[in-house]
Image: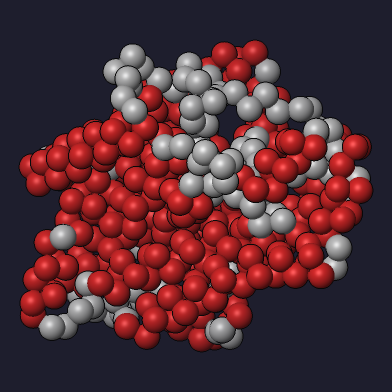
Amino acid sequence: MTQTAHLSRTALDRAASPPATTDLSAGRTRLLGVDAARGVALFGMIAVHSLYQADAAGLPTWSFTVFGGRAAALFAVLAGVGIAFMTGRRRVPLTAGAGPVAALGVRALVIGAIGLALGYTDASLASVILPYYAVMFVLAIPLVFLPTWLVAFTAVTVAAGAPVLRQLLLPRLPEPTYDNQAFTHLIGDPGALLTELSMTGEFPAVTWLAYLCVGLVVGRLALNRLMVLLGLLYTGALLAAAAPVASWILLNRYEGFRQIWFTQPRSGLTAAETTELLVFGGDGSTPTSTWWWLAVDAPHTGTPLDLLGTVGSAIALLAVMLLAFHVARPVPRRAISVLPVPLAAAGSMTLTLYTAHIMFINSELDSFEPVTGYLAQVLAMVLFGTAWWATAGRGPLEGLVTLLSDGARRVVTRRNRANRHRAGMSMYSQEETRRRSPRQATTRHRR
């Protein structure tokens, strides 16, 4: 979404082309930077779940101000980056698409199953994002076949159009439960489950597809090039700053707040709930009483400005993490090569650690005060993540997802290769038959 503002189609595709030679140190640096960004997203999301959102005066705490809405968006953008890495950081040809489609489809199924297995947990403590991710991965499958400039255009279209579409459809769709989805929902009413995951829930996949598009574009860029990273940092910071400014102008200078409060009686919210929504954000959508709600940039409102600002903060933070590994001076470079390792280790197994976090805060083990509990979780995850990363590599759930998705890719690729081989042999045999049949007929006639 952000790249089209600064790059033409040709320039974007050129920047997205990986170098002709494989630079192992650059690839390792890129992965460490992305994993470190995942670690920030993980600990930010845990902060939103574990720490207080409001202070004694009823105002947002600093942790919620920093991470509210941004941590989850960073996760989604990095999921798009991961899809880019899975597909070789380039457009997938249609003739070679069966393997990536199978891998993404199986990945979606496994992540969705893990998310539904966590459906017993209390949504008031934390809404489980994994079932939404499963739908996002399915929706992202066609994107891997598109050129980079068209993926960027899709991001802009989704960010601008999906909130409008949802504003039109929400009055006609069933009310979401906002429960954590479980297998019972899948069996009892799959249509309602799919509607909530895709349109009406807290992380609506149709709207959040914009994040995956942005991540796919960023993942295809040459992330080992300094100028590309500086461009991402500049673009991300600009968008992160522009979104709240634009929202303030629209709501204050153009009487957006006035219209929101004028239509408040028919919004379905009380005055207190309206204030809370404007200050702390929503559950994935806004009331449909007036179109001025789309000018809000509060967390988890799914408005264009909410998407714009959180996309900006996500790519800016990713750029900072990647730029940290470009430091050339020996002393800070040695420090940087050591300090982010625990963060990157935890970030390399976010699925495992996120699942453990959801289970922990829903268990009797979580009897700590908010700050103490948060610090205990971070310390445990850093220690476990670093030890596991240094000895076993991938996290347990990451290993399971990779094993199944790579296995599906290999099976489908092998089957397609065998089918093409048989088709080629069949064509060859038919050609030989046509070429030899007159001679064979003559021979038989002479006999």
Left or right position of 179 against 231? right
On screen, residue 296 above or below 44: below
Q: Position of residue 74 (x, y in %)?
A: 45, 54
Q: Quadrant of the N terminus?
A: bottom right
* Identity of the residue furthest to the front in this view: 57
Left or right position of 19 against 264? left
Q: How many marks?
A: 0
Residue at 24% x, 61% y is 32
Residue at 23% x, 52% y is 343
On screen, residue 270 above or below 24: above
In this orientation, does residue 237 appear? yes
Looking at the picture, the colour scheme in use is secondary structure
Residue at 82% x, 56% y is 257
Q: Nearer the viewer, residue 417 or 27?
A: 27
Left or right position of 401 against 443? left
In this orientation, does residue 442 appear? no
Q: Nearer the viewer, residue 98 or 400?
A: 400
Q: Nearer the viewer, residue 105 or 98?
A: 105
Left or right position of 248 against 338? right
Q: Nearer the viewer, residue 296 or 356?
A: 296
Q: Position of residue 263 (x, y in %)?
A: 91, 45
Q: Position of residue 226 (x, y in %)?
A: 32, 83
Residue at 67% x, 61% y is 305
On screen, residue 267 above or below 321: above
Q: Position of residue 369 (x, y in %)?
A: 34, 28
Q: Quadrant of residue 354?
A: top left
